[in-house]
């Protein structure tokens, strides 16, 4: 079977593109302190919104799922429910509950993944390995339910595609018990381990005023005392019925961002249990006709990283007129720039990680030292190693300085 | 399995160093590549180590559909690697562009930019499949 | 039914009164979703009014849609107290796609306006840093992929 290679003429600008490379971030520094931050995104710009206009509503289920592989269910679920509203159909209760279960299981996987990566950024590789080993429990559950570890494709327009048997329900509940116990252990570590406290407490401050003014979203906002969560404030799926607490911390630092996510993971476990124990009988999906009459809908979902917004317009055909997606990471870029200003260069990796960025992250950064007029480029790995080394040498000074404040 | 244990022994002597580069993908393949390093799958038993610099790497592991912004960097990284060098392309996006095929933002296959030795299809491929790809690559390395 | 959408309807009436002849249309789509269409001359006032009267400090994003002869801009605002998403919308001519920036009122617009500039070619007058956000540097100037008439095969 030969793969037919279609080449699309990709537009090229007037200047000849002599292998230019660009840095994602440019840091203006003074000695060891960050003064200003400029960013360039677009590394993962694949032209999805344009592509979606030439695909059917069903095909776009699989396109939207892959906007982000870590929160794929958030994207697909938001897309599906927005299209359902567009078409004037409602997923049956059992389908809605299963969709919600997948959303919460995904939040567990995403937060645990993040915790491991954050640990790696500060050189705490033992924790990284432990967390990713335990994360396999939720990966197995997702595979048992959907057939895949990532990109579960559980949603369809009108509900979900696969049901959950009683046997499976039982196994998921057992898995949730393990995840709960392990997450509680990680919470203990995060609140007591010096390695983490030195690198996270009082670092990367985003005040509540700044979080509100810059419209931060998700755990990043909730770690700065902003009490918003779309699941409670603009209920969708089964969230109108599932009891849960919104986790808010007010220390406004990286440690708060860690604890918000850890506590949210524990909350997810409770929610998954409730959904399974109260799973209604009935169909898991309802019929969907191919075409959708002219309409427009704003759909919002609380993805693991924060507010995910879909604006979809229909035009009477089987393809959308316009699909607009605003990912939570885009909303947190200005807040993270604020957090970095005034901090140490050595804090950059963990502060960036703190917003749980969902772009092909920081590959390279350009540094411009104002006072010495030096310029240099570091890869992500170089910056990570520098920051671990710097904290080994200066950690105690930093802590003393913080105690004085 | 005798073949596998021979490879394991050989790999321990050779210990190929890997550079991982995401060319604008959704990160699904990247998490599975990293998962392959964690205890459950443990690709380190083949002696593979993740390194940060192209100048020290033997193997380039690429994910993603190669967006326009990442294409030049990908080519440069490949050029900076010393010979003999090998490329492992992970995920359907690296083969055809995956679901993004036809979008103005993507190239439609890593081999449009650099030569590839092994493709691992899947969206994303499971860590076991990635390890299978690694073994295939080691066979190639052994022959070189 | 009437009681359920009380605040949503209040919002529409309030904008109608505030904007007068600059108010084009108001629509309560469902609970929590209000759309207000305004004349371009008054859209900034409308945004400021939303913030001051309804405390919509949260700008979720700015959606741009190519309608053929015009480009429609939808500003999705959120009122956290009443938990309502108010979308303020206006149309600008494609022949002269210019509109004032709102980044002095909503700082997050600094990012969202760049996105609409990049992909649809709308100029936000007064934006301190209106440059590309997503498209690569070597993508040709004045080519905006989200315009309906643009097709990938056509260029070059």
Image (cartoon, coloured by chain):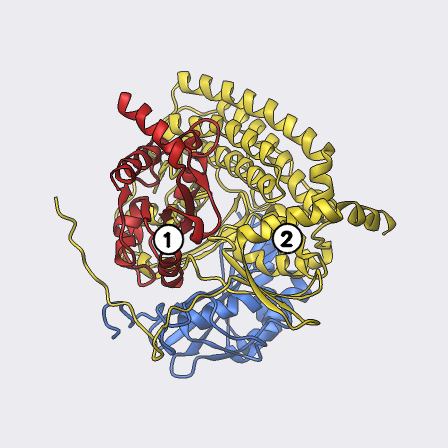
Measuring from the top left, give residue C141's x and y in whole percent.
38, 78
Q: Nearer the viewer, residue A363 or A333?
A: A363
Badge 2: few (under 14), some or many (20 or more) residues near its Cα, within 10 Å? some
Q: Is residue B64 above or below residue A284?
A: below
Residue C32 visible (yes or no): no
Residue drawn at x 35%, y 38% is: A153
Q: Are marks 1 and 2 on the same chain?
A: no
Q: State how far apart marks 1 and 2 are (Cα).
A: 56 Å
How many dots with numbers? 2
Residue drawn at x 78%, y 49% is: A398
Q: Mark 2 falls on what kind of element?
A: loop
- Tag 1 subunit: B
Q: Is residue A359 left or right of residue A92?
A: right
- Chain depicted in blue: C
Residue drawn at x 29%, y 45% is: B92
Q: Colour of chain A?
A: yellow
Q: Is residue B132 left or right of residue A239?
A: left
Q: Colour of chain B?
A: red
**Label 2: which residue?**
C80
**Label 1: which residue?**
B82
Measuring from the top left, give residue A130's x and y in whole percent.
56, 29
Measuring from the top left, give residue A331's x and y in whole percent.
56, 57
């Amino acid at each position: 079977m030969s793969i037919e290679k279609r080449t699309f003429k990709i537009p090229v600008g007037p200047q000849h593109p002599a292998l230019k490379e660009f840095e994602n971030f440019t840091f203006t520094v003074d000695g060891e302190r960050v003064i200003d931050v400029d960013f360039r995104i677009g590394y993962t710009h694949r032209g999805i919104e344009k592509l979606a206009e030439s695909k059917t509503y069903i095909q776009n289920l699989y396109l939207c799922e892959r906007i982000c592989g870590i929160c794929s269910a958030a994207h697909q679920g938001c897309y599906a429910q927005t299209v359902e509203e567009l078409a004037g159909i409602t997923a049956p209760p059992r389908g809605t509950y299963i969709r919600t279960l997948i959303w919460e299981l995904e939040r567990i996987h995403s937060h645990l993944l993040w915790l491991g990566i954050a640990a790696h950024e500060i050189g705490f590789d033992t924790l990284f390995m432990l967390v990713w080993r335990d994360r396999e429990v939720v990966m197995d559950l997702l595979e048992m339910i959907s057939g895949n570890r990532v990109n579960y494709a559980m949603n369809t327009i009108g509900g979900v595609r696969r049901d959950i048997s009683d046997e499976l329900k039982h196994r998921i509940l057992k898995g949730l018990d393990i995840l709960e116990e392990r997450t509680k252990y990680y919470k203990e570590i995060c609140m007591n381990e010096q390695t983490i406290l030195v690198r996270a407490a009082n670092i990367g401050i985003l005040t509540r005023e700044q979080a509100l003014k810059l419209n931060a979203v998700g755990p990043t906002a909730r770690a700065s005392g902003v009490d918003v969560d779309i699941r409670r404030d603009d209920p969708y799926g089964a969230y109108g019925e599932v009891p849960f607490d919104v986790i808010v911390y007010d220390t406004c630092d990286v440690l708060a961002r860690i604890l918000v996510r850890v506590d949210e993971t524990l909350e997810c476990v409770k929610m998954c249990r409730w959904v399974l124990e109260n799973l209604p009988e009935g169909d898991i999906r309802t019929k969907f006709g191919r075409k959708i009459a002219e309409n427009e809908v704003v759909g919002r979902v609380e993805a693991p990283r924060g507010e995910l917004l879909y604006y979809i317009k229909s035009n009477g055909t089987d393809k959308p007129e316009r699909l607009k997606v605003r990912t939570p990471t885009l909303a947190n870029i200005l807040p993270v720039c604020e957090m970095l200003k005034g901090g140490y260069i050595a804090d950059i990796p963990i502060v960036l990680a703190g917003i749980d960025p969902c772009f092909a992250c920081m590959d390279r950064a350009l540094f411009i030292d104002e006072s010495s007029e030096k310029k240099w480029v570091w890869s992500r790995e170089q910056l990570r190693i520098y920051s671990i080394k710097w904290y080994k040498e200066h950690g105690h000074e930093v802590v003393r300085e913080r105690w004085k404040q | 399995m005798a073949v596998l244990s021979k490879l394991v022994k050989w790999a321990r002597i050779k210990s190929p160093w890997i550079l991982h580069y995401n060319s604008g993908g959704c990160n699904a393949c990247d998490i599975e590549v990293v998962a392959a390093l964690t205890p459950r799958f443990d690709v380190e038993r083949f002696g593979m180590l993740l390194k940060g610099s192209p100048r020290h790497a033997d193997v380039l592991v690429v994910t993603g559909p190669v967006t326009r912004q990442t294409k030049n960097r990908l080519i440069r990284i490949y050029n900076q690697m010393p010979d003999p060098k090998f490329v492992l392309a992970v995920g359907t996006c690296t083969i055809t562009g995956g679901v993004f095929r036809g979008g103005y933002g993507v190239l439609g296959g890593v081999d449009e930019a650099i030569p590839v030795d092994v493709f691992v299809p899947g969206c994303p491929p499971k860590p076991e499949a990635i390890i299978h790809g690694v073994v295939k690559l080691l066979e190639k390395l052994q022959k070189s | 039914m009437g009681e359920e959408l009380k605040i949503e309807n209040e919002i529409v009436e309030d904008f109608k009164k505030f904007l007068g002849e600059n108010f084009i249309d108001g629509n309560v789509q469902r609970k929590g979703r209000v759309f207000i269409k305004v004349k371009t001359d008054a859209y900034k006032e409308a945004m400021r009014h939303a913030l001051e009267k309804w405390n919509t400090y949260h700008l979720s994003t700015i959606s741009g849609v190519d309608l053929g002869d015009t480009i429609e801009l939808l500003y999705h605002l959120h009122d956290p107290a009443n938990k309502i998403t108010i979308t303020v919308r206006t149309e600008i001519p494609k022949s002269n796609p210019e509109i004032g920036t709102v980044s002095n009122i909503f700082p997050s617009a600094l990012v969202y306006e760049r996105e609409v500039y990049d992909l649809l070619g709308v100029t936000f007058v007064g934006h301190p840093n209106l440059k590309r956000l997503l498209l690569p540097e070597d993508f040709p100037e004045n080519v905006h992929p989200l315009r309906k008439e643009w097709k990938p095969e056509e260029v070059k």
